[in-house]
Image (tube, rainbow, N blue to C red):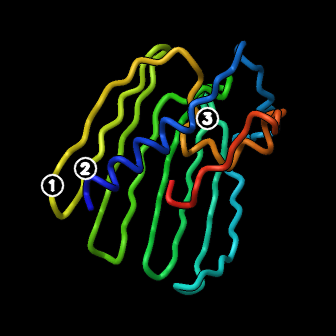
Amino acid sequence: MIKKLLVSSSICLAAATLFAAEIPSFDTAWITGKPEVLTYKTAAKEGDGFYQLSVWRSAKGVELYMNIITPTYTKSVWGAMGADFHPRESKSRIVVNEQVIMTTETGYTPSQLHIATLMAPYNRVSENTISLSNLVVDFSQVPLLSRTLLLNWDRIFILSESC
């Protein structure tokens, strides 16, 4: 089970890499210094839940915080990115059935990303630094994509819910 979750996480991260020919420009001027908070009610076979999103501009760039809450699953994500929308770091925690907890920290430099995930209750850490030459979409950026990017839908594919 642990290996499947770690492999799934790695595949999702790799699948989120954008293959851009040039560095795109991003319009984040609509993001203000005061957090914009949006809350949505969700419905699933496991029961009703909530999706909450907060986004704001800080002195260092753009920050985002999101919570996905259902009766058996909770995911909280915080991410920081530059004003140019390139990710700097993110932290997330996933809790499944109050038993499995995955805590992930991701950091970015211009040519690398470092990702470390602690899986509890097993207390096993999966950690890796990956060299990259293309842009990466961090999970914390996903809610902003449709409002920020001029997407070429011929080159976009949808990641599964498990990501």
Neighbours of disc 1 within 10 Å: few (<14), some (14-19), many (20+): few
Q: In the current view of this chain or complex, which residue is farthest to the left?
A: 123
Residue type, mark 1 in image: Asn
Which residue is denoted by mark 3 in the rendering?
Answer: 58
Q: Residue 29: horizontal and vertical position, in percent?
A: 80, 32
Work out whether mark 3 precedes mark 1 in sequence or the reverse, and give the earlier one.
Answer: 3
Which residue is denoted by mark 1 in the rendering?
Answer: 123
Q: Nearer the viewer, residue 128 or 37?
A: 128
SS of the residue under disc 1: loop
The answer to whether marks 2 and 3 mark residues whose Cβ atoms lie closer than 8 Å is no
Q: Nearer the viewer, residue 5 or 61?
A: 5
Mark 2 and mark 3: span between their CA atoms?
28 Å
Work out whether mark 1 precedes mark 2 in sequence or the reverse, and give the earlier one.
Answer: 2
Work out whether mark 2 precedes mark 3 in sequence or the reverse, and give the earlier one.
Answer: 3
Neighbours of disc 2 within 10 Å: few (<14), some (14-19), many (20+): some
Q: Residue 123: horizontal and vertical position, in percent?
A: 15, 55
The answer to whether marks 3 and 1 mark residues whose Cβ atoms lie closer than 8 Å is no
Q: Which mark is residue 118?
A: 2
Q: Quadrant of residue 11?
A: top left
The answer to whether marks 1 and 2 mark residues whose Cβ atoms lie closer than 8 Å is yes
Residue name at image x 81 percent, y 36 percent: 154
Residue name at image x 49 percent, y 45 percent: 12
Quick check: 150 above or below 48?
above
How many numbered marks are there? 3
